[in-house]
Image: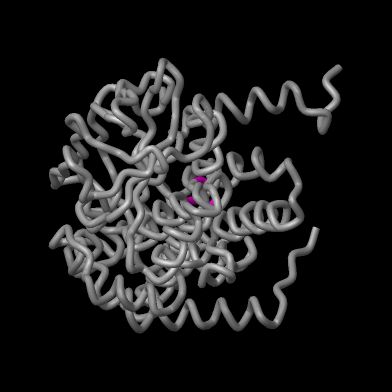
Amino acid sequence: MRFGLSKKQEQFQEECRLFVDREVMPLANQMDRQENTSEELIARVAEQGYLGAVVPSIYGGSELDYMSLGLMHEQIGRGCSSIRSLLTVHGMVTLAIRKWGTEQQKQQWLPDLATGSLIGAFGLSEPNAGADAKSIETTAELVDGRYILNGRKKWITYGQIADLFLIFACYEGQPTAFLVERSSKGCTTHAIEGILGTRASMLAELHMEHCEVPMENKLGGIGLGLSFVATHCLDYGRFSIAFGAVGIGQGCLNDSLEYTLKRKQFGVALREHQLIQKMITEMTVHIEAARLLCMQLADLADSGDPDSIIAGWKAKYFATSILGKITSDTVQIQGAYGCSIDSNAQRYFRDAKIMEIIEGTTQMHEMIIAANAYTSNEYEVK
């Protein structure tokens, strides 16, 4: 199986790489320390069209194919997992409106989401409901022509600055999706600080106390919130994280190669030590394998193949599982410097653990991939 990039895709990949090197990398460690994303950087990301990556061109978006989306997420992930997370959750909200929204909702929200005039955030997790999304406790009821939402959402990426939240609540006992504006009466956010990784992703807890939402802000049908809307969004989330994890791995490899070329120990360049060579070899092969799984995923998604769903679970599982060893080895190679705040390695190391948790834990992936192996026609069990 061979995946070749078109000239246009190669050019886009190079543009993303240069943008990350020029605009993202110089700020990544500082933003991580400050637990805050630069407003100017978000504006530059928007100017590049990255926030409108999945918005149809008729609404002002870039409307990238999946392979190009993957290339973008890999490069941004190499630079800063927090910014990549912004592209993820913003894209999830955008995709939900694109697929499940009415024409009025599309015209109202998509143009501003495409330009970054509005920032979207995904509101599924709660204090008592994470991977078990069916246990959400947030409720909605219809009162005098408006939906009234009550509940709390937690670990909301970029919830501190988002303008539009995609919220999942139980209406008449059925999971339903709603678009909730930050300015909605009864909606407040509270910053979450001190997270292990992706520290610049500006997490927040969202409180809805008799939060008033217009009837026209219900997204999709009643009862379709989890099985259709959220599932579609989470598929995209895994796609983004898988490619972003490859980016983290590539960033580690780049830094390790640069460091071992310059650093000497016992009068010999680190690159000459066989144990260092073993680490570099494992990094190289694992990253290439993960990238191939991701490219297969993008190829299937671009062709509309339903196997892209399970391919997303496999790609995200492998790409994130290998990061623990890759990032640990990168810190090990750099020694004390790798543990310092000046090194990308310590940030990659912490971010890697987050990748194994969000959009489905490693253990959830193992359950789903194994179940698929038993039921798939791809394998003949005798």
Range drawn in magenta: 238-242
Q: Determine which quarter of the picture holds residue 209.
A: top left
341 and 128: which one is in front?
128
The main secondary structure of the magenta stretch is: helix
Does residue 341 sit above or below 16 in this rendering? Answer: above
Side of 225 where 194 appears, left or right: left
Does residue 220 sit above or below 140 in this rendering? Answer: below
Does residue 278 sit above or below 147 in this rendering? Answer: below
| Residue at left offset 22%, top offset 57% | 161
Q: Where residue 39 appears, x then y in whole percent? A: 22, 71
Q: Where residue 346 appears, x then y in whole percent? A: 26, 58
Side of 191 where 41 appears, left or right: right
Residue 316 showing in the rendered view: yes
Residue 13 drawn in magenta: no
- Quadrant that contains the N terminus: bottom right
| Residue at left offset 74%, top offset 65% | 3
Q: Where residue 302 appears, x then y in whole percent? A: 71, 58
Side of 340 where 357 appears, left or right: right
The colour scheme is one colour
Q: Where residue 147 appears, x then y in whole percent? A: 32, 31
263 and 313: which one is in front?
313
